[in-house]
Amino acid sequence: MEHKNSHRGCITGKNIVLVGNPNVGKSVFFNYLTGRYVDVANFPGTTSNVICGRCGDDAITDTPGIYGISSFNEEEKITRDIVLHGDILVNIVDAVHLERDLFLTQQLIDTGLPVLVVLNMMDEALQQGIKVDLKALRELLGVPVLSTVAVDGKGMDKLKEAICQAKVGRVLPLVEEKLAELPTHIARSEKLLILEGDSLVAARNGLAPGVYREQIYGARRRFINEVIALSVRETSRQEVWNAVLGRWMIQPITGIPLLALTLWGLYLLIGVFVAQTVVGFTEEVLMGQYYEPTVRAVVGHFVSPDSTVSQILVGHFGVITMTVTYLFGLLFPLVLGFNLVLAVLEDTGYLPRIATLLDRVLMSFGLNGQAVIPLVLGFGCVTMALMSTRLLATDRERRIATIILALTIPCSAQLAIIASMLAGLGADFAVVYALIIISVFVIGGTLLNRLIPGQSSSLWIDLPPLRLPRISNVLKKSWGKSSEFIKEAAPLFALGTLCLGLLDISGSLGKIENALKPLTVYWLGLPKEAASGFIMGVIRREFGTAGLFSFPMGDVQKLVALTTITLFVPCIASAMVIYKERGWKEGTAIWVGVICIAFFIGGVINQLLHFFSNNLSSAFPLMMLAGTILLAMVAMLGFSVRGEK
């Protein structure tokens, strides 16, 4: 049977749709056809937006990675509607995973639309001992089949010619039989989806969803198994090192030590080298010693240094000093370092394996395994971690991760000061401090999972083969994402510093400090000067932490101060990212909520310690507090387990 959109010659003015499973390289083909760069990632879900371009007179559409054109998730719904309006379907297939990918191929063929199958990653298939008989595959599917190694450009020169030859393939006999039962005025491709029970397509055609999904899926799977048996053979049964290492990464016994080693390296690279060494140079030397003095000198030639305009522009919260210093001296190195690391983890295929390994633990907090990246990166820089919440699949998960990061995760600079302070207090105080923060993390995550409406997504993830990252791809992607973030963040940071500058000039910041004194003295039990430390903490977390210890305090006061400042709101840079990612209304709610929780928990710790110390011997207060915290953690974990059952 020949379809009216089959093409024998050159194609012009057609709608060409790139379709395929996650991680098959669709974006590389889109880039080749249109000359436009898009994200090329080895991690499921990275191509989450529909991207369009032109190739001559033809429209090219790159669709999200899917496993079928149905209504099981948002990506499938989007791709389904694009496919139904396509003229030619270019199905990109991973040659290593033909048994999985060809199921979608046959579904596309069953729509009756012209199809071209592109077998990508043929080099990896050969490395793993997989040999594909292209001639047999063409005959069995009834459509042209092109083999490529897209990242090396092999076979790409034949792509445009192959698209011209796309044609309708061999539709399953069962599908042909069932299609005849539906009205003739309905498009053939929509008939297929109605038969498979797609309620949305059925509703817009005024029909009830079909009941043949299982029957058609079973027939399709049996046919693909036959195709694989007749066209694919393994020339070697020996497992390659990559496959063995990939299995080690997702098994708890071997995966957890490998993950711990990776996270330690990640912390040293981002949390220590980038967040401290690189940022120390860019922020303190380049910006502090060169940029800011130069700008102040230039502005001083035009306006008086004591004037309001000068204070707004180049004062302590200067729009053209603090904004630029934070954006390019602090944030840009962190963002670029984070994106480089993330790109490497994506392109090697390790990121989905980390998510798989930790998925079960994080499900207790309404998250899935993908959330491990933001949580770990938070110990390097919370600002950077907040940006990485974009990796999470649902808005609910992004909201939970944002609140947990803002509340419980100290950045590396703050953590260094906290560690030095705890060292002076002794091991017993350090243990209690750690239990407090961990208990807030556990209890907070459990409660957020219960209280925030909606359902978090399950971890449906494809584990791509491990491979060495391509430097050009990593650098191009990292630079593109980093520069895009700076462009988006600049207006928000300028507005934030302007507001702080106006508060400072008007004397409102001093009034805020005085207003905090009853809270800090009577509830937290701290000296009245501690109010200035919390105000400094809004600007930079480590400044606030260091500021709290610039005056004498007792050991209990230090523990309360450390607990409160750790749980206190993240710095202005992180606050601006929260506003950017969550919007002003929700961002303000998170910001105010975290402040209230920090002061509440700090006050409760202060009151409990004073209660125990007044009623028990001096050896018991910390032990009693630690026991109370442990009981609370056990109770919340038990509550979580019962809820899951």
Image (tube, rainbow, N blue to C red):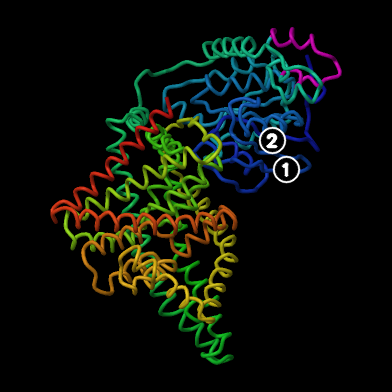
In front of the other: 614 or 519: 614
Question: Where is the C terminus found, in terms of image quarters?
Answer: top left
Residue 266 magenta-drawn?
no
**In this picture, is 176 found above or below 574?**
above
In front of the other: 24 or 415: 415
Q: Residue furthest right?
A: 185
Question: Where is the N terminus found, in terms of image quarters?
Answer: top right
Disc 2 residue type (three-letter): Lys
Picture residue at 79% right of the left edge, 9% below the top: 181
Q: Which mark is residue 453?
A: none
Main SS of residues in magenta: helix
Q: Is there CB contact under 8 Å for labels 2 and 1? A: yes
| Residue assigned mark 2 | 160
Q: Residues within 10 Å of mark 1 (few under 14, many from 20)?
A: some
Cα separation between marks 2 and 1 = 9 Å
> What's drawn in magenta, residue-wise?
173-192
Picture residue at 41% right of the left edge, 34% below the top: 359
Residue 181 magenta-drawn?
yes
Picture residue at 37% right of the left edge, 28% below the top: 243
Name the spot of residue 613 as percent of width and height, x first.
19, 56
| Residue assigned mark 1 | 55
Q: Image quarter for residue 638?
A: top left
N-term mark: 2 or 1: 1
Q: Image quarter for residue 615?
A: bottom left
